[in-house]
Each structure stands twice: as structure tokens, then as C-alpha cells.
Amino acid sequence: MDPLPLSPQVFSLLAGLVEERTGLHHGLDRRDLFAERVSTRAVERGLDTLLDYYYVLRYDDPDGAEMQHLVEALVIHETYLLRELDQLEVAADLLAERARAAGSARAWSAACATGEEPLSLAMLLDARGVLDRVELVASDVSGRALARAQEGRYGPRALRAPPPPPLEPWVDRWVERRPDGLVVRRELIERVRWRRVNLLDDAARRALGAFDAVLCRNVLIYFADDAARRVVQGIVEQLAPGGALFVGVSESLVRLRLPLECVERGGVFHYRRARP
Ligand SMILES: C[S@@+](CC[C@H](N)C(=O)[O-])C[C@H]1O[C@@H](n2cnc3c(N)ncnc32)[C@H](O)[C@@H]1O
């Protein structure tokens, strides 16, 4: 299907609305991809122009269901098991220390996509003997991604490299490696509380409570600075005393000019609320 025509004015209206609701920024460099995906959805809705589709989204979508359809078409779920493992190891160490000292700890994978991130963290917590003392929450804006997460079935590429030898027994314990892909054991999937949360929805985010470690990795890169600032500020307010925020290794929060402290541990950086 050829995309519907997208004038610069309508692109600006539609991309602006998507950014306002989800934080997702589409610059001119992504205009063709945006036009393609929005057109597919507009045509499914039986609309002839993208301006009509904009009017539906803006004025005829009281419960946000149409915006949710569009978001499902726009988000990128790229992720894999044990991604950026050094960070996950440090997060698991911090959570284990907290769980041993306080009896329990809480962790949040804040844009978990198809679930590989929280499931990896769960395996690392098990390797430290604290899985039953850490409450794991995983959320994403995409209901489709969350449904896949709860199936726990992945292609062979979900494990890009063999796990390092000390981790091998834990991966073998929880992940069945079949010739056609990977199957995660149900018990591990059920250790995680899966929630659909738009990070820009302050009330939904706050309702998740306070956390000792938050992984918000490889999502802020898709946000404009204002949205990223708002989300990070909100997450930081949800950190328990001494709690840590991890962003992707190629992401930096310095540009956001927020009162954060950047902490290094074992060569891995994370953020904490700055001391007053
Ligand atoms: C590239 S994946 C990152 C997955 C994982 N955190 C990792 O680092 O491997 C980005 C995820 O962010 C989610 N996302 C995008 N905008 C969001 C929003 N406003 N609220 C919550 N999740 C969002 C997407 O649905 C997608 O699953």
C-alpha cells in the first residue's frame, strides 16, 4: 500500500499529538516511516486523508483507544536477553544488598518491551539467592509487547551470545533452548507483575509505588528532551532512599539538567537523586 500523502503541516500536527501523548518524537528524518505507519492505521479505520485521521485522534477518541492502536504501530520493541549485562549485574547486586539488609526490595523495568529485560534481571536475582525477596514490576506502553512478554517464547536471536559461564546454570534453569527458539519457564514469568503504563501518565506511574532500582533503558532516546525530563523527574521521585536509576549505556541524562547524582560502580553508571 502506498502511504497517504502527508503534508508538512499535517505531519507537524500528527507528530506533535503523538509526542504530547507518549513522548515519542518523530523528526523530519523519520517522516517517511511515520507516514507509512500512520497511513496503514488510517486506512484500516476507513479514512481517506491523514488530516481526517488527525481529527479522529484529536476530537473523536475519548478513551484513547485509537491513539493506543497508533502507538502499537509506532513503537520499537528491539530488546534481547541479558542486554547490557554489566548494568543488569550491578542492578541485581544493589537489589540483593537491599533485600538482605531490609528483608525485601522492589525493582521496575519501566519500558520492558517483550519482557527480556525483567526476565533477565529475575535470573540474576535468582543467581544471588534473593529472587523471592525482590518484587519485580515490568511495564510498557504497548499491550501487544506485554502480551508477548507473558508468553515467554522467543526466537533464537533473543540470546545473542552464550551467557558467561557463571550465569549458564541460571539461564539453563529458566530458559529452555530449543532448535527453533527459547521458552522461558512460566514460574519465572509469573514472578513479574506486568502492567501497561505510559511513562507520561504521571498518575499511572506513581501508582506503581517506590523502587530500589529502576531500569529505564533504551526508551528515552525516542523522546524529545521535555518529555524525557518529565519522565526522569517523575521516576527519580519514585526512587526509595538510596535507589538507583539505570538508563541505556548510550544514553546520558546530563542534557536534561536535573538534580541527579551520577554514580559509578564496577565501571557501570547509574543515577540517584542528588543530595540536598
Ligand atoms: C527499544 S525498547 C527497550 C526495551 C528494554 N528496556 C531494553 O533496553 O532492551 C523501547 C520500549 O519503550 C516502549 N515505550 C515507548 N514509549 C513509551 C511510553 N511513553 N511509555 C512506556 N513505554 C514506552 C516501547 O513500547 C518499547 O517497548
Image: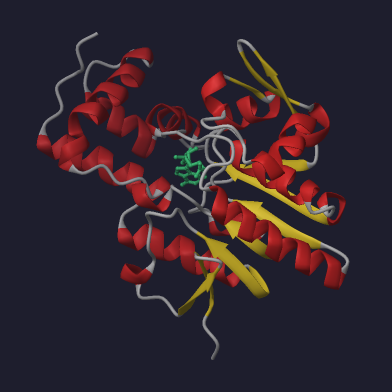
* 227 over 41 or under it: above or below: below
Q: Quadrant of the C terminus?
A: bottom right
Relative placement, left or right, of 116 versus 125 is left
Relative placement, left or right, of 5 versus 149 is left
Viewer-proximal residue among 119 and 274: 119
Residue 18: image location, x then y, percent: 34, 42
Q: How many marks?
A: 0
Extreme residue toward the bottom, this view: 276
Give me the residue at 41% from left, 34% from top. Answer: 75
Q: Quadrant of the N terminus?
A: top left
Q: Report whether residue 223 is seen.
A: yes
Viewer-proximal residue among 125 and 226: 125
* 246 over 197 or under it: above or below: below
Residue 243: image location, x then y, percent: 64, 71
Q: Residue 226's quadrant in the figure?
A: bottom left
Relative placement, left or right, of 102 versus 83 is right
* 17 over 50 or under it: above or below: below
Residue 222: image location, x then y, percent: 35, 47
Give me the residue at 29% from left, 33% from top. Answer: 54
